[in-house]
Image (cartoon, grey):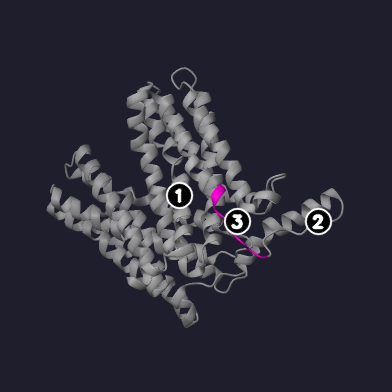
Amino acid sequence: MTAWWSRLQGWRERRLVAVLLMGFSSGLPLPLTVATLSFWLAEAKVSLTTIGLFALIGVPYSIKFIWSPLIDRLPLPGLTASLGRRRSWALAIQALLALAILALGATDPATRPFLTALAALSVAFLSASQDIVIDAFRIELLAVEDQGNGAAVTQWGYRLGMLASSAGALYAAEFGGWFFAFALMAALMGVGIVTVWLVEEPDVPGATLAPLQGEWGERVWRWLGEAVVAPFLDLIKRQDCLAILLFILFYKFGDALAGRMANPLYVELGFSKSEVASISKLFGLVATLAGLGAGGALVYRIGIFRSLLLCGLLQIGSNLTYLLQYEVGHHLGVLTLTIFIENFVGGMESAAFVAYLSQLCNRSFTATQYALLSSLASVGRTMLSASAGDLVERLGWELFFVTAATAAVPGLLLLVWLIHRTPAETVRIGPALRT
């Protein structure tokens, strides 16, 4: 622990603080287009059908890899030369995002829900774009050995930002109305703006495109080749590329499968909304933050690959706590234990997994490749786990949670295979960054 703490001193500590605050800026906008917005819509007496359609606003988060090459490689005229590639994009997006949040708060969903939806979609698009540049900023800002701590710290900030724009926004709306709440959230975007302004631009050799010669059409074609095609080819040409992509897809499958049916289980066991909310908000948040910290420390101590394997095994065990909950029934003590263990282990696993994705990226294409890899990971958490309800109906609760636990096995077997295919020194620190 002493050795780990020493890594946070000096310039590394300052950079991790910057990563924390940029994580806060990334997490802040998300609830404003999901939970907080749905509460506002319901209070404004918007129909449930319309509220359901507002879920489509979240699509930009799933397809952000489409425009990530622009943010990764396209300079902003008049800004990039003076601020740098990452800082110029981050500051421009954050300023527009603050204005979009303010505009969203100025709409009236009761009379003009279309304008509210349009403003919310703008917030979601800019928020997803901010995630692209902030993720790349974090990866390039930190040294290889600090990626585990960086993964934990950025998620601390992300969750604190979400807390500010969910519970914080509701308190603010209760005090001063919805426009006041959204104006306050727009002002909080200043945290990220000031942070990016003060932090130095990452030094990434060979990350900028050389001037392109020739006719306009030829220049565009070459730019597409270098900025769009090259990052994808770089991934495809990696050793064991297919195994890596399948591992990313399946690693958190079991966790997503069990987690999707956790709340329906609590309802069936007779827990009230207030009981679940109180325990999940308090113990769940504390456990997640603690797990993220433990995961970051674990990555630093034993390396990414070993951390992924250990956390994956722990996740199988934590999923089985749902079986204990089902057998005991309505018991607040066991519910607290279940939520704490699940969130703590999930935090550890997330820290190791984000560090793994970060170190897979070639620093010449950081934004594009991380956006693609994180989007692939989200498929396992969403599309593959969509069958969870049907499995419960077919298998029953006990066999379902056993199935969910074993669903993590394919990902772990792929991980073991990759470990055996990887040099021992790389296993110690994780997959080498390509520069």
Element at badge 1?
A: helix
Q: Is residue 37 left or right of residue 266?
A: right
Q: Residue furthest bottom?
A: 424
**Which numbered disc, 1 or 2, marks the residue closer to the eye?**
1
Mark nearer the N terminus (1 vs 3) = 1
**Quarter of the image that includes the C terminus:** bottom right
The range drawn in magenta is 197-205
As measured in the structure, the alpha-carbon distance from the residue carrying label 1 to the one carrying label 2 is 36 Å
Q: What residue is disc 2 on?
A: 212
Is the C-beta separation of discs 2 and 3 under 8 Å?
Answer: no
**Viewer-side residue, 379 vs 277:** 277
Location of residue 333 in the rendering, given as x and y in whole percent from the top left corner: 14, 51
Residue 417, given in percent of the width and then of the height, sits at 45, 76
Disc number for residue 201: 3
Pinpoint residue 358: horizontal percent, then vertical percent: 51, 62
Mark closest to the chain's N terminus, 2 or 3: 3
Viewer can see residue 393: no
Q: Position of residue 89 (x, y in %)?
A: 62, 47
How crowded pointer 1 is (Cα within 10 Å; few <14, some 14-19, many 20+) is rated as many
Disc 1 vs disc 2: Cβ atoms closer than 8 Å? Answer: no
Between label 2 and label 3, give the one nearer the viewer. Answer: 3
C-alpha separation, residue under disc 2 versus residue under disc 3: 24 Å
Taking the spot 72% from the left edge, 54% from the top edge, the residue there is: 224
Could you tell me what secondary structure mostly forms the magenta stretch? Answer: loop
**Amino acid on which disc 3 is placed:** Glu
